[in-house]
Amino acid sequence: MIMAKHFIFLGAPGVGKGTQAQRLAQLMDLPHVSTGDMLRASVQSGRETGLRAAAVMESGALVGDEIIVRIVEERLLLEDASDGVIFDGFPRTIHQAHALDNLLAAHGDEIGAVLHLDLDDEEIVGRLSGRRVCSKCGAIYHIRYHAPTVYGLCDICGGGLQQRDDDQPAVIRKRLAVYQAETAPLIAYYHDRPAYHLVSGEGEVDDVFSRIVKAVGVAG
Ligand code: AP5
């Protein structure tokens, strides 16, 4: 018996994984599990894991597999994950993908869909350099494509909007190179599975979301 179905967003930094994962989580009533958000929360709280991760994240490199697998493992044990989660930014290395497969096999869980979002690098750089994130609820904005109603404030909770430290041009370039070296091999890892879907990340947020909903096969 399948216990839970988990959904994976795969794609380069800035392709729109967080934006789309938040929407899919809402539609499917599943938790949005972003390893980036979890690490940033850990940095804010001053916990040891966060302190060790902070410098790595600011440089644009990947945090160690061991830390990531442990936080995901702990997250999947929480009650709200019992029907499945929407992963955003995990897995990101072949090691993490193997660890996830082992974890799912041990629990009788499976992957509902691997949603590989694709977009060209020029568009990605434009999206990342204009991104602003709510410091309170994590909602994602863009100064041109998705501006808040009141400058600098979140439409949802009124929290202040911030630019992420790793959205500086030099770090964006590094993150894209790290994606090619460490994460792009996951495309071949998942490509031949029936759950794999290549989804264009081009166009409006609503258009991309319609493609995702169609791929997943849920009513939008
Ligand atoms: P993480 O937070 O996961 O960052 P990322 O993968 O680099 O992805 P981003 O959050 O930058 O982009 P996104 O694809 O979510 O795009 P978004 O929807 O925001 O990771 C940060 C760091 O943490 C890593 O570098 C690493 O150090 C560490 N880390 C995290 N997970 C790890 C792991 N598993 N292993 C090891 N280390 C890990 O959109 C971007 C912008 O575009 C926004 O402004 C948005 O409003 C706009 N936008 C979105 N869609 C559209 C659209 N269709 N049209 C116009 N604008 C759009």
Image: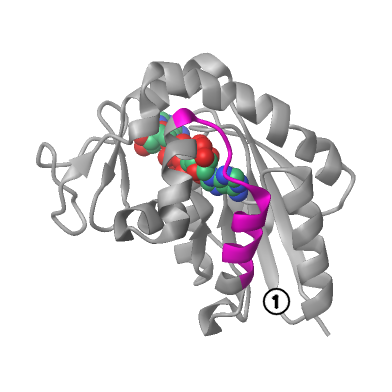
**Which span of residues is magenta-colored?**
59-73
Q: Which residue type carries mark 1? A: Ala
Q: Nearer the viewer, residue 119 or 44?
A: 44
Q: What percent of the width, then of the height, locates residue 216?
A: 67, 56
Q: Nearer the viewer, residue 149 or 3?
A: 3
Q: What percent of the width, then of the height, locates residue 27?
A: 49, 64
In the rendered image, the vertical position of residue 183 relative to residue 99, given as above or below: above
User: Going by the image, does 170 lie left or right of 73?
Assistant: left
Residue name at image x 60 percent, y 55 percent: 68
Residue name at image x 53 percent, y 70 percent: 30
Location of residue 142 (image quadrant) = top left
User: Going by the image, does 201 lie left or right of 115?
Assistant: left
Q: What percent of the width, then of the height, locates residue 44?
A: 31, 55
In the rendered image, the vertical position of residue 115 relative to residue 218, given as above or below: above
- Image colouring: one colour
Q: What percent of the width, then of the height, locates residue 97?
A: 76, 52
Q: Which residue is mark 1?
A: 4
Q: Is residue 78 visible?
A: yes
Residue name at image x 82 percent, y 77 percent: 106
User: Going by the image, does 110 lie left or right of 118?
Assistant: right
Q: Nearer the viewer, residue 176 or 202?
A: 176
Taken as a whole, is the magenta stretch helix, strand or loop? helix
